[in-house]
Image (cartoon, rainbow, N blue to C red):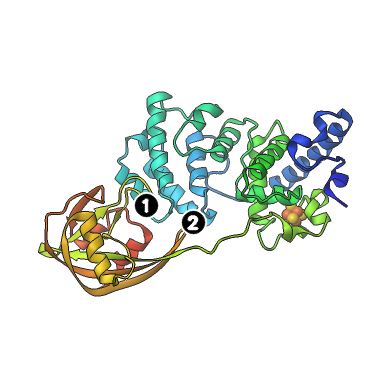
Amino acid sequence: MDRAALWGWKGRGRTRHLPYRRKPGIMNRMNERWSQIRRRLMDWYDHRQREMPWRGEGDPYAVWVAEVMLQQTRVETVRPYYRRWMERFPTVTGLAAATMDDVLKAWEGLGYYARARNLHRAAQRIVRDHQGLVPNNWDDLRALPGIGDYTAGAVLSIAFGKPFPAVDGNVRRVLARLFAVESPIGKPAAQREMRNLAAHMIPPGRPGDFNQALMDLGAEVCLPRTPDCDSCPLTGDCLAFRQGRQADFPVHTMRRELPHYDMTAGVIWGPQRKVLMARRPWQGLLGGLWAFPGGKQILDESLESSLCQEIHATLGVRVAVEAPVATIKHAYTHFRITLHAFHCRYLRGKPQTIGCAEWKWMLPEEIQKLALPRTDQKILNAILGE
Ligand code: SF4
């Protein structure tokens, strides 16, 4: 049975073709089905919702922080970070007044550091333009740094009880299966379709709970590889289940193999056992974090020679590369790296901010106070262990 027959319409599956815009009889049938889905989902959520420190939270700032932390990050990883963050920066005003170093240190290890920088910038803008109150309308929220459709929808629905959808990766997967969405999930057209579907499904009374119920269903039951349909409250409504095609949805475009780069980093020892650290430029990957200077291996150059050249290009100093410290493999969203770290001896040249935002000579023990990328934290652990 195709999806048009199952759902009682003859459109092509795209929202703009849904006949409820034109045929009130069918619209009533659709509304009836959607209210069944809502009822089943909300019953399930009332009994099975996950316990999380931010659940039941009415403070829009707390909801905003939790939703930003949860982007691309597992709930279990977020829990301790969220607790520490709310103790350290309990209000928008407190966050706005913090230094960027404090903010990055509190975020250290959580990854995607642009999220922390944007939270900080947005907090400052809220203090400046909105008297320290998180805006309760779509336009003002969306105008803040780092707040996209998902975060705006989550804050408005959960903290302010407004009927906006919040469609994250989990919700997208549930909707793709529920409605057997055939367009590739990453395409803007599919994302629009899912936002429209989610918007139509939101019950007027409990928009925040409904969005969170969909998120929980995606995270706990409608899992990417092994959906637990036996435990799902929506089996009777799910087109993928009824067609036995759960594994076909969501539809993905072909994934390209992630590129791999060999990178280098130098632990540059100078006078008085101090190490030369560089702050990465504020824009771009890991922006504003401190790191052991280095860069990509240059084509046809050895690791040691590449490292010397990268350090000179970043700081304008000359070093002699000595023994290896560690080799670290790490995967980012769009590429993988193998980072080769070496001890280096400082030779000459006054450090300059050529390819970095700032530099400092520091004792290894002091480096622990800086916000470092995960890879550099491992280098630090290696030298402290030595
Ligand atoms: S029935 Fe299965 S595939 Fe459909 S929404 Fe539930 S868990 Fe996902």
* Among the 4 quarters of the image, the one containing residue 202: top right
Does label 1 or label 2 sit earlier along the sequence? Answer: 2
**Residue type, label 2:** Thr
Residue 77 on image: x %, y %: 49, 56
**Residue type, label 1:** Leu
Check the image and name the residue furthest to the front.
300
For the residue pair 79 and 236, the one nearer the viewer reads as: 236
322 relative position to 161: left or right: left
Dot 1 alpha-carbon crowd within 10 angstroms: few under 14, some 14 to 19, many 20 or more: some
Determine which residue is flagged by label 1. Answer: 286
Residue 77 numbered mark, or none: 2
257 relative position to 130: left or right: right
For the residue pair 240 and 134, the one nearer the viewer reads as: 240
Q: Is the CB of mark 2 within 8 Å of ligand 1?
A: no
Residue 290 on image: x %, y %: 29, 54
Total label count? 2
Residue 258 on image: x %, y %: 50, 63
Dot 2 alpha-carbon crowd within 10 angstroms: few under 14, some 14 to 19, many 20 or more: few
Q: Is residue 364 above or below residue 127?
A: below
71 relative position to 287: left or right: right
Question: Quadrant where the C terminus lies?
Answer: bottom left
Element under disc 1: loop
- The answer to whether residue 49 of the structure is visible from this angle is no
Q: Is residue 227 above or below residue 172?
A: below
